[in-house]
Image (spheres, helix red, strand yellow):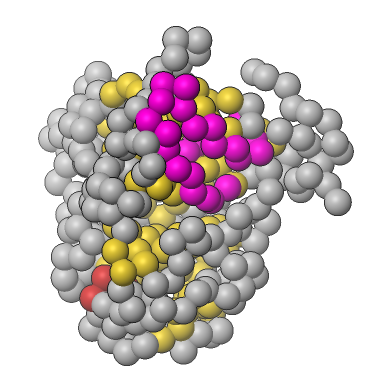
Amino acid sequence: MAYTTIDKPTDYFTSFLWTGDGSTSPRSHTGVGLQADMMWSKVRSAGHQHNLVDTVRGVNQRLLMPSDNGDEDTTCTHGHFDSLDSDGFTTTNAGGNWNVNASSQTYVGWFWKAGGSASSNSNGSITSSVSANTTVGFSIVSYTSTGSNATVGHGLGAVPSMIIFKRRSGDTENWPVYHKSLGATKNIKLNLTDAVSTSSTRFNDTEPTSSVFSLGTSGDTNGGTSPFIAYCFAEKKGYSKFGSYTGNGNADGTFVYTGFKPAFIIFKSTSATGAWQIYDSTRERFNDGTQPALKANGNDAEFTKNVDILSNGVKLRDTTSDANASGVTYIYMAFAEAPFVTSTGIPTTAR
């Protein structure tokens, strides 16, 4: 069996950097390299919110903020994304504010390709609207809550390793996360530093299957009759990896094997409080022992940490609680820049 079936991960996930010019007119950005269905972005040079858009909810003035528990923003007074285009995206700034195009500010965007236009999915007790890419194990799922225990079809044809949920309106709710290393009896919040918590009402203590995920009655996964969005990821060898590790508190830290050079990786401590730290190879600094990091749960500007991005994983050289404290357990999500070995058995070369 081939090591991977995905020789060019950048067809499905990539990062892109840009600098704002302050213009309030629509501005087209090209060179991303794919038609994305989800874009998560952050101003790097200043403390301001994260922004997330997707084609299932609609892109134009439909911002969600992973660092915040607020409802979907449909006014976007700080600027917004007009569209996700064939090779990039279009922004509109608003009065010189900082979301997308403030003058001289630097930005990063992370882009995932799902399945294009959404289709109705009736595999669960709640009918969902799903854009799914089964090749790389990524789907965007829209559903309306019922307030009762339920199941929802995700369209992956494989068991999700990680699911990120957000209630879009009707209440201010956190971003609960299911991760396979924690299981369905536990959850953690993308917008908080909290350690893992136990709850039977979020995922109904039921592991997802290859066709559906399960919901309890919690307000942040299935409360009332409100619109929700779920971002579902199934692990694909050579392209994505979802797992856990234990920190050693040492500058010669834990090595996290992914089987590819990460284009994007995010860590979170689960047995203790700590930030969600995001790294990517587009912002990567070579040969100086530090890498630029951003916090998913905060609006902080970019900072640096002692992390090495390697051809087959990540070496943690930071000794703080956010990434490598002694005896602390962490979860992670990673996507590939290049597989360690191609589908034909040839090792990939360094850039």
Residue at the image position 33 percent from the left and 78 percent from the top: 200
Residue furthest to the top: 288
Tell me the quarter of the picture where residue 261 sits: top right
Where in the figure is residue 111, as x and y percent of width and height? 48, 43
Between 87 and 200, the one nearer to me in the picture: 200
Q: Is residue 180 above or below residue 39?
A: below
Residue at the image position 17 percent from the left and 54 percent from the top: 75
Secondary structure character of the magenta stretch overall = strand
Residue 145 in sight: no
Between 261 and 68, the one nearer to me in the picture: 261
Verify whether residue 261 appears in magenta. Answer: yes
Between 341 and 34, the one nearer to me in the picture: 341
Q: Is residue 230 above or below residue 81?
A: below
Where in the figure is residue 318, as x and y percent of width and height? 37, 25
Residue at the image position 28 percent from the left and 48 percent from the top: 272
Residue 178 in sight: yes
Where in the figure is residue 183, as x and y percent of width and height? 46, 67
Residue 138 appears left or right of 341 = left
Residue 32 appears left or right of 251 = right
Tell me the quarter of the picture where residue 12 sits: top right
Where in the figure is residue 14, as x and y percent of width and height? 53, 37
Which image quadrant: the C terminus? top right
Between 335 and 129, the one nearer to me in the picture: 335
Residue 48 appears left or right of 251 = left
Q: Which residues are magenta?
A: 241-267
Residue at the image position 41 percent from the left and 21 percent from the top: 251
Verify whether residue 118 appears in magenta. Answer: no
